[in-house]
Amino acid sequence: MEMNLSEITSIRDGNPQCKTCGGVGITLAEHVRGSRSGALVLCHCIGSDCNTCEAKGQAPFMTFDRKLDKMLPCVCHNARFSLRNLENLVEKANIPARYRFQFLSTIDIGDTANDPDMSFIIAHDWANELVHKFKNSDFTPQGFYLWGGTGSGKTLLACVILNELVFRYGITCKYAKVNKDFLSAIRDTYQSDSETHGQERSIEKEFANVDVLVIDDFGVQKESEFNNRKLYDLIDSRYEQEKLTLLTSNHSLVEWRDRGQGRIYSRLMEMTKEIELKCPDYRTKFVKR
Ligand SMILES: Nc1ncnc2c1ncn2[C@@H]1O[C@H](COP(=O)(O)OP(=O)(O)OP(=O)(O)O)[C@@H](O)[C@H]1O
Ligand SMILES: [Mg+2]
Ligand SMILES: [Zn+2]
Ligand SMILES: [Zn+2]
């Protein structure tokens, strides 16, 4: 199966008449061996014309034109560059394999019978509006603070938004688990044998400056002066630069105020819309009884 990406990207490097890719030139091949999320591939509408390409998949994808006696871009040129650019953005975004190449249209809309307030549908709608209006001049994108029980789809929804934004607008996004990807990465820079030794500032800058940041599992980190300060600095810097930040947590926002983190709380109140997911644990759906 190949997924047509023409609805979620404005890339048009393929044959406009091609039914498979809708003119994109790139499709998402699903059920790829050794990958649960699939892989981006050139569409057959380009691949079949590209047998003249001397580079055979190596940049700069030029081919020698005998009549004109010079090198010209191969028919695959633009599509291969777009493909590579998308792959780079996806790679940089650090999205775990399980949630890579998942989009608003590919996930379940929610278990309405067991989700009394239709919380997943509301969050899904909200995400839909965000990704569609993201670049509109009369729209101010607001982040979200998504919280709820385990398996309710928080990480999935946050990653879906990153995927949509990467494909729609080609912007830089980053997924980070609060401990493993952020706090530990900073702590590692203090180790003299670490390959990131001494790079604390540049790592912090990267998190502060990326267009869209997901902070996953916010609240599992230990309370310590160091952790609180690093998280405060990150959130404050994104707040000041008005950058979009998406957080997921098992705790409600107000708990931060009650834990004495009033300055984080007040910034997050302004930067994000708080949504509680009340749907049941999706993981248990697949457990065989
Ligand atoms: N609406 C949905 N459609 C398809 N898959 C879903 C949906 N909701 C959850 N899942 C799947 O269920 C699993 C759990 O979802 P997810 O990891 O997003 O939960 P979570 O809320 O982040 O849980 P935790 O608090 O334990 O981190 C994942 O494999 C995810 O892909
Ligand atoms: Mg999660
Ligand atoms: Zn095609
Ligand atoms: Zn070629």
Image (cartoon, rainbow, N blue to C red):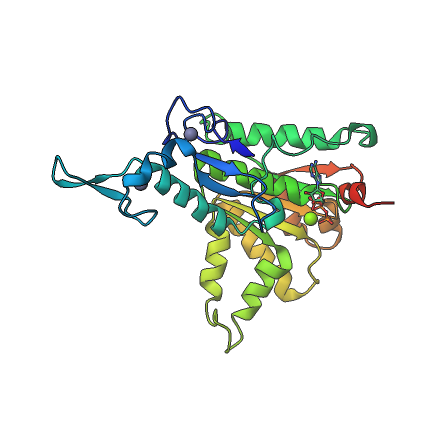
Q: Quadrant of residue 123?
A: top right
Q: Position of residue 38 (x, y in %)?
A: 55, 43
How many numbered circles are shown?
0
Viewer-closest of 134 and 259? 134
The residue located at (62%, 61%) in the rendering is 180
Q: Where is residue 21 in the image (x, y as percent from the top left)?
A: 46, 29
Viewer-closest of 26 and 113? 26
Q: In which quarter of the image is residue 162?
A: top right
Taking the image as shown, residue 168 lies to the left or right of residue 248, namely left
Taking the image as shown, residue 204 lies to the left or right of residue 96, namely left
Taking the image as shown, residue 67 lies to the left or right of residue 50, namely left
The residue located at (23%, 42%) in the rendering is 63
The residue located at (53%, 52%) in the rendering is 94
Outermost residue toward the bottom? 192
Q: Where is residue 209 in the image (x, y as percent from the top left)?
A: 46, 50
**Residue 215 seen from this side:** yes
The residue located at (26%, 46%) in the rendering is 54
Q: Quick one: quadrant of the C terminus?
A: top right
Viewer-closest of 132 and 96? 96
Viewer-closest of 245 and 54? 54
Outermost residue toward the top? 17
Q: In which quarter of the image is ligand 1?
A: top right
Taking the image as shown, residue 161 lies to the left or right of residue 217, namely left
**Residue 269 seen from this side:** no
Q: Quick one: quadrant of the N terminus?
A: top right
Q: Where is residue 187 in the image (x, y as percent from the top left)?
A: 57, 68
